[in-house]
Amino acid sequence: MMKRLFQVLAAVSALVILPSCTGKGSLVLVQVDPMTKILPEAAAFLPKADTTETARGAHATFQFAFRSPVELTDIDVACTPLVFEGSVATVVRCGLVGLVGIGEPSSDPAHDVLRSASGMFPDPILTDVEGTVPAAQASSAWVTVEVPEDAAPGLYQGFFTFRAKAGGRRILRRLPVLLRVWPVVMEEPSLLTVNWNFDFPECLSRWNGGDSVEPFSDFHWEYLEDMAASLKEAHQNVTMVPLFFGLVKMERGEDGHWNFDFENFNKTARLYEKAGVLERLQLGEIGHRYEPRWESGFGLFVPDGKGGIETRKIDDPSVLEFYREFLPALKENLRANGWEEKAWQKVCDEPVDVNADDYRRVIGFLRSIYPSIRVMEALQTTRLSGVMDVWVPQLDTWHNNYDFFLSRQKAGDEVWFYTCCYPRGEYPNRFIEQPLLKTRMLYWMAFKYGATGYLHWGFNYWAGDPFGTADRPGTGTTLPGGDSWVVYPGYHKFESSLRYEALRDGIEDNTLLAMLRKKDPAAAEGICNRIIFNWWVYSTSPVEFNAARHQLLKALSE
């Protein structure tokens, strides 16, 4: 696996050199803003002010761009801990930023979409890998630092080290890393967030260097533990656990009744609970459209007796026969494990206006058996009042029906929002071809418009070569590069990405804004409005963003 990652870097990564050249033909290395994506053809870079700022209990990120007139080999990067008066800020990640192709560009791109002449974009952060980068190609290195809650406020300093060979000559560069830690201590994030994570055989194999993993073997549980730790770093506090697809064993006894074994489901949920990412338990979907059409009505899953599942209409007698045994067993298992009050059911994904009535009938059927079941759904309709407990509209659906969703919040419902392969255009999303700030500002938008949570479907839905082309076919569309996964498979570990770093930092921004709102609502709203003007007009200037965040930290510290 390490060899393959090395080859990936050699083939697609670039070195970015900066105009700190000491002579003709020398390497240029400079610190740049971590919200700037360094494209491989970049010839000049805008240096960042030396000092980064953050709160206690939060993270800080640093990026160092480089480029060389000759090929660089054996590239190795490192960063010392950052220290101040006996306090230490820990380096949790230091690596080279790799490049990926996005495949087919998304339709209806925004005005600020990034264009790469090579078709390659920076995204994965590869750790523990010595890289090779072609001559005159730009690239960057990344450092993530975690500040303890009890760290002393002040100016922390460490050193970033860059080593490589250029034309047979060894190169060594050291740059200072400065971090100002403000007195404020970041609270535990209150924004509820979930990225659906997957343990399908293909995902397990990618993590295991291409070798298959036996379901529910020691390696399988190690994979889930690694994934949970990655989710925890980015403050995910809601995790979806499937009910079908093997986690719950469902067998029909000789007496005709169903038997359910929740052992693997419970072990999975406990693992996430121990990792601190199960403040809420989203139960995986139990139904789907019964035809491959967006307008189709919905049916519920029923075991087919061959180890698989079928989607059947609720008027099929086998559906009632199955669910009048399954739902009480599910409820009893949740209650026995202390999860009933934190469980929310995903039923049938993304209902729209034309099939909302059919979705409503499905919920009525379920509640006729399990009256207290609570429903949480990603959706693109407003026609489910009285049915939905947690509304999760797509960002544009939320925007276009904002007054309606405000009324649902006043009525006691929760309102989240989600993005996926849509919306496109000027709406922010997390596509690789977009400026990095657009991923981060999703959480500023959640603050501005009052969402309780944010959902995305694709944490690690890896397919093909995740380090090659990042798009993939979808139902009636192409899932843009960056939609299906936000982390990458290392060997027995999950590698972060520029977008995953922005996701985590955006949640921390949201938390700090919420803290300031308790203290000074007008100040919090004013700072947010410096970045988010409305639903599709915003600032993607790192300079303006850093100024707003400085104002936020200063206001919290006063």
Image (spheres, rainbow, N blue to C red):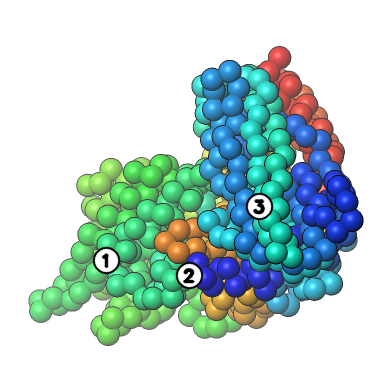
Camera-side residue of 434 and 455: 434
- Label 3 – label 2 distance at C-alpha: 22 Å
Residue 304, image quadrant: bottom left
**In this figure, which residue is indicated by the disc labeled 2?**
1
The image position of residue 200, as x and y in percent, is 41, 71
Camera-side residue of 24 and 395: 24
Mark 1 Cα-neighbour bin, 10 Å: few <14, some 14–19, many ≥20: few
The image position of residue 81, as x and y in percent, is 56, 34
Residue drawn at (44%, 48%) of the image: 229
- Name the amino acid, label 2: Met
**In this figure, which residue is indicated by the disc labeled 1?**
217
Q: Is residue 177 left or right of residue 223?
A: right
Residue 462, compared with residue 176, is above or below; it is: below
**In this figure, which residue is indicated by the disc labeled 3?**
163
Quick check: can you spot residue 487? no
Q: Is residue 165 left or right of residue 2?
A: right
Mark 2 Cα-neighbour bin, 10 Å: few <14, some 14–19, many ≥20: some
